[in-house]
Image: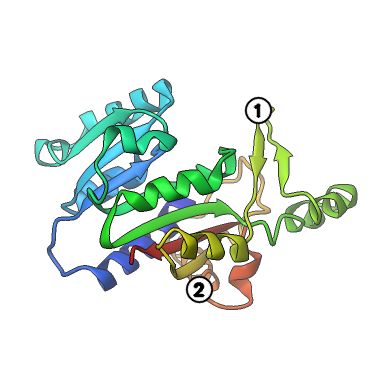
Amino acid sequence: MRQELVSRQLEEQISGRFPVGRRLRVLDVGMARGTQALRLARAGHGVTGLESDPEMLAAARAELADEPEGIRERVRFVEGDGVDTGVHFKPGAFDVVLCHGVLMRVRERDALLAGLARMLAPGGLLSLLVRNGDAVALRPGQAGDWRGALAAFDQLSRTDEEGLAVRADRLADLTRTLAGIAAPLHAWYGVRVFTDGAPDDAQAPAGAELDRLLAAEERAGRTDPYRSAAALLHLCGVRG
């Protein structure tokens, strides 16, 4: 659900910013299994995936191995951390930089974002997917966890199921940060407005019901006030 919604939103931003048919230079920072990287490669773009986790990197390479040769030759993977983009790449080397699900686990958020902005060519697109700090009380509240809901109002950090610290970010804070690194916010969406409270093992519906679910989520993700209550925020900044 998350990947499909973000892919649709990203496609909208790319098609509205770059000429049709242009092959873009894309950097996917913290690409995990490479879902978005492969989608963009299938669309004809040249993609570099940066990932620090060897297991995730191996999984992405296995996924890539199943693709046709024409797609494989448009993708390269680099083992490395998002804070070290300046070590691996030259400033202005990319038209699009993705950083999805990474900021929540990074201590020096602003330093990472400044480094990502430097990777963008003028007019380039920075795509961020973050936990929504303005809606962190919703999930425990909807589950009847009142202690957790009350604590969430004043606490943007929590410990996840694996014992790792996870942080949420507020839209207003990130808007200021993006303006400060010369990649001001151009558009933003909510992701998982209606489905965040579903059990972790819940199965997505099939056929027409899935289409209706995606349509509802997609519309809510771009409509006020619903998008402000989404579990995740997809922010798109443009390099000045």
Residue 1: in sight, yes or no?
no
Is 134 or 8 nearer to us in this picture? 134
Q: How crowded is mark 2: few (under 14 residues within 10 Å), some or many (20 or more)?
A: some
Q: In this view, does 22 lie to the left or right of 133?
A: left
Q: Is residue 151 above or below residue 77?
A: below
What's the amino acid at mark 2?
Answer: Arg
Q: Mark 2 points at which residue?
A: 222
Residue 162: mark? 1
Q: How crowded is mark 1: few (under 14 residues within 10 Å), some or many (20 or more)?
A: few
Q: Which quarter of the picture shows residue 65?
A: top left
Residue farthest toward the bottom in the current orientation of the protein? 224
Q: Where is residue 117 in the image (x, y as percent from the top left)?
A: 37, 53
The residue at 53%/59% (across/down) is 177
Q: Which quarter of the picture shows residue 62?
A: top left
Residue farthest toward the left in the current orientation of the protein? 70
The answer to which of marks 2 and 1 sits earlier in the sequence is 1
Residue 105: mark? none
The residue at 38%/48% (across/down) is 116
Q: What element carries label 1?
A: loop
Q: Is mark 2 on a helix, strand or loop?
A: loop
